[in-house]
Amino acid sequence: MAAQSNPLIDDSFVDFLLYSVLDAESLCELEAYQQHSKETFDLYLDSLRRFARQDLLPTYKPMDEEPPVFRDGRIHTHPALPRLFEQMVELGVLTASRPESVGGQQMPMLVNTLSSAYLMAANLSAYGFIGLTRGAAHLIEAFGTDEVKERFMTKMYEGEWTGTMALTEPQAGSSLGEIATSATPTDDGHYLIKGSKIFISGADHSITENVVNLALARIDGAPDGTKGISLFAVPRLREEGGSLVSNDVAVAGMIHKIGWKGLPSLAIEFGDEGDCHGWLVGEPNQGLRHMFQMMNAARISVGVNAAATASAAYHESLAYALERKQGRKLGTQGGEQVSIIEHADVRRMLLRQKAIVEGSLALLGTVSRYSDISEHGTSEEARERAGLLLNLLTPVAKTFPAERGFEANALALQIHGGYGYTSEYLPEAYLRDQKLNTLHEGTNAIHSMDLLGRQVMSKGGAPLRALAEEMGSTIARAREAGCDPELCTALEEAVATVASTTVELGQRGMAGDAEGMLGHSWDYLDMFATLVIGWQWLNMAAVARAEPVSEERKRATEAATQYWIRTEIPRISHLANLCRTNEDSYINAKAEWF
Amino acid sequence: MAAQSNPLIDDSFVDFLLYSVLDAESLCELEAYQQHSKETFDLYLDSLRRFARQDLLPTYKPMDEEPPVFRDGRIHTHPALPRLFEQMVELGVLTASRPESVGGQQMPMLVNTLSSAYLMAANLSAYGFIGLTRGAAHLIEAFGTDEVKERFMTKMYEGEWTGTMALTEPQAGSSLGEIATSATPTDDGHYLIKGSKIFISGADHSITENVVNLALARIDGAPDGTKGISLFAVPRLREEGGSLVSNDVAVAGMIHKIGWKGLPSLAIEFGDEGDCHGWLVGEPNQGLRHMFQMMNAARISVGVNAAATASAAYHESLAYALERKQGRKLGTQGGEQVSIIEHADVRRMLLRQKAIVEGSLALLGTVSRYSDISEHGTSEEARERAGLLLNLLTPVAKTFPAERGFEANALALQIHGGYGYTSEYLPEAYLRDQKLNTLHEGTNAIHSMDLLGRQVMSKGGAPLRALAEEMGSTIARAREAGCDPELCTALEEAVATVASTTVELGQRGMAGDAEGMLGHSWDYLDMFATLVIGWQWLNMAAVARAEPVSEERKRATEAATQYWIRTEIPRISHLANLCRTNEDSYINAKAEWF
């Protein structure tokens, strides 16, 4: 209900973020993006906005209600998908961010991230086929030989075939070192692949004739653990004598996911009949390293999905709060009932959603911009600094929108009252969709370990120092622009608290107390992410004061900034205290106490 | 999976709570319960535990997967229900807490609450028919004339007919004053009822032949608003000439709820053909007052449902964490993978669930005990004091298990990793079930207004003073028992903070700033509930030290107490600060800023 008029994401916010806050036009000064301008960015952005609202969104609920069917060994996806996929290919979504050399438009990731967010908000499953295909093709582009590129990548970037990642195995959920799928060399240049994979999204469908799985496997005799894993392109059908024949890739089952219903998640078997060919991508035994070079993009993409899903639900609940009459204004009796947005607690739920959704989008835009500079910045120094910030912020960009987005989605449902508990309204579907984002591409807990155990400790603390400098600049700019000094000081103190807590935890870890350090990674991530979002909001508040924006934009930005800094930033000293005092209730808890 | 071996709730915890912490046996000294003893309590408790695990739980997933069907004007519920309902009637569940005068066992509510929690944890929809029938019959018992009791109540308490509450109307979700259903007197003693109701649970089914709706309606000419509402018994079929005939109650539609799938939620029409008879229950225009006398029980029941649903999911995730092998212990490499409970963050998620689930059950037991004393205590003073505490704590007993239970349910799903995102495992179903509890029987926000605007301000602050005394006694007992003095002091300071914040908000309200007071009701409820649960845990820790309990019980109780007081209690000063400084971002936010 009201779904077709849902804007999905606030256009004026995205324009503000893109051009006022993150100065997308300045990227056009870089050689890689010199063919671009505000005009080409807007053209692309507007075409995706229109398509998302007019074509994608109306298919969301039908696809949620009619999930794929597993019949006669094949997966039959929703009939609307082939046309939607074709339209997205025509719009250039598959290759917008790829270089001209492979047929792309070489669009900055910043523009690409904020444009594709609309598609994800409208129908994340339909967009999923595009994201998976681009990710898989990109891996081949980066590491494949010319022969492998010719065989697979071209058809994928043209949208003729789709792609997917085939990593997970039943015995090796988050522990990729346990992967057991085998690859036996042959004299014909390919390998024979044998093994079982699970949770493989889109490994079969009825959209295009073929799917290329980018699979992790072990070449016979390879070392144990993570150092013996290689990357292979394993198509469902292979070319032989000018036609496509079966490549011995079988669908063993379909997993009944609770959301993302348009995109099947499958158990697949490679080489049941000993005839599954795979082509090595990159160096032998370097599969995980290759994969991880693409991981930042995949993780940021999860964050965008999460922010987009929370945004769609936020707008759904905003429309409901404006329309639904219930009760009277506090302190009055009689007369007509008022829209529920007149109740302070409903505005609390809306402002909290807004702070999470738009704070997430701002962070995702920021890291996307760092990604652009890290690849195409004008100096080695600029590229390196952007790279440090990108790596440091990626765990936050993945986890914050997923974790707090789920909370925002629950608030959207709550605003709908009893109606929110029904499948006649959309919030419950968005809530189901959102939950995946705390789980896939590494659970959020794994990213908290990555942040504390790896990113903040890397290079003698250089990334964290770079981030503290960025935050310092923002605070200075906010003071200069006349933002509330109390908010500026609160953020400044929080930066110092996070920095000193990091040092203390690092020292504990170096002294050999691994649990005393990493046992606090969840609280550390929470603290760190809360600060990062506070920084994003203060930055936006500073820009909204300094730039010519509408009065409503200025006031709205100030309200959300005040909300976040007053309500969330004080939690940082509490979380820091838990880390510093080594709060050990769960760390020391024994299994038999539960 | 593993569902049939799920214990649902930890028996040894319930025994500890019932007999060591809340001294259920001492209730047998009261005249009302003198026919009872630990033996009769255990007999009842054990029979429900067995039935919940052996009979109810196996029907949970089938009922989730096959919701009722609306066909030919009737609702066809799951075929397992008639037998389950009959078994629960035979076990005495319908009338366990009712007096002997109406065929009950006059069991203390304390025992009844903790026993029925097992049934709710096993299959909350199946139990729902019992809870609704008892609630409706209880209203007739309390306010009906002998003729109305004879006509309806007896058959309901015998399980021959079911009952339900028919309050909500489409235009009047949470605003009962807007109710428009009409009641026209006739010369035959009954009224003619006409109007539409929505979200009516179990108003039709295929379990028993008849349903009695306890409906709110306005007698012709009654005053506007809440003062003109009366209560009626409106059966689906009425007795005429010794047989049952249609009473012109029609099912207009079935709502597609996302959980509680076994219990249909219906839109119904009274008197489409002008022939719907209703019998007045209680005084004219006193319907809401009558209803509200039963509201504490209904609200506590929502809390028990919430705690039970979170408990079932907690045990599901505990079993998974013990069984699932993944990764290695921190700081080690190679060797076999370990159970995921070996990872500190998994224990964090388990301990947090445990603190929420068992803290909720302790609170629900405590308020149930207050309910028993408020009705049957030996002195007027004891009854009054227990009544004050009961009323004060009821909003917390309803909202805390619902709000934090949802969080606990999400953690149970998260522990299952990717498998948690599938309907092959139970946590996603429990998560769906749980969400209703923040919405029904008044949204949680409405209860936050009740707590701050009504309960803590009532009788010159007497209820809050009584609670502070109770907490003071607990802290003294904990110190005496040798509990960690830091934890005792932290709770003591939190009591003072909540008390002084209450005074400040009350003064603001009395000065005429209603929004400045009630605009903070959400943070106030959060603060208040966090304190209450801290009190419950410290109390249990003190008892575990003083009484002869197992070493594991003692250590487990200490761990959860430490976790809650160190991790959650410090949030109180932050929340108090938001109230005191009148943080106004959302209070002042305008609709056009969203």
Image (cartoon, coloured by chain):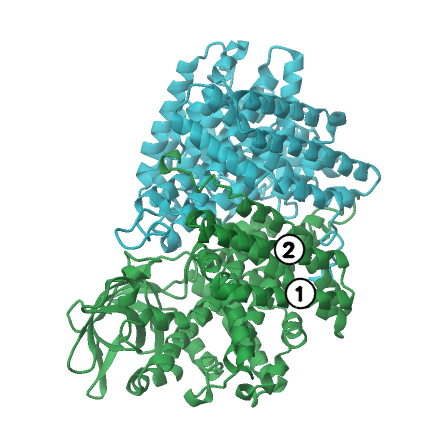
Chain colours: A green, B cyan
Q: Residue under mark 2: which chain is it in? A: A
Q: Quadrant of residue B380?
A: top right
Asked whether residue B457 is in view, the answer is yes
Residue type at tag 1? Gly
Q: Quadrant of the N terminus of chain B?
A: top left
**Which residue extends farthest front?**
A511
Tell me where residue B402 sits by quadrant: top right
User: Which structural element holds mark 2?
Assistant: helix
> What residue would you read off at disc 1?
A472
As displayed, is residue A413 above or below residue A476? Answer: above
User: In the image, what residue occupies the spot 74% across and 39% down?
Assistant: B225
Three-letter code, disc 2:
Ala
Across and down, in percent, residue A69 comes to: 32, 64
Q: Nearer the viewer, residue A135 or B494?
A: B494
Left or right of residue B322: residue B277? right
3D distance between C-alphas at marks 1 and 2: 11 Å
Residue sitting nearer the eye, A31 or B318: A31
Q: Position of residue A403 (x, y in %)?
A: 51, 55
| Mark 1, secondary structure of its residue | helix
Q: Earlier in the sequence, mark 1 or mark 2?
A: 1
- Residue in the picture at 67% in, 23% down: B466
How many marks can you see? Answer: 2
| Residue A494 - label | 2
Position of residue B1 in the picture relative to residue A475 (left or right): left
Q: Residue at x 55, y 78 (%)?
A: A381
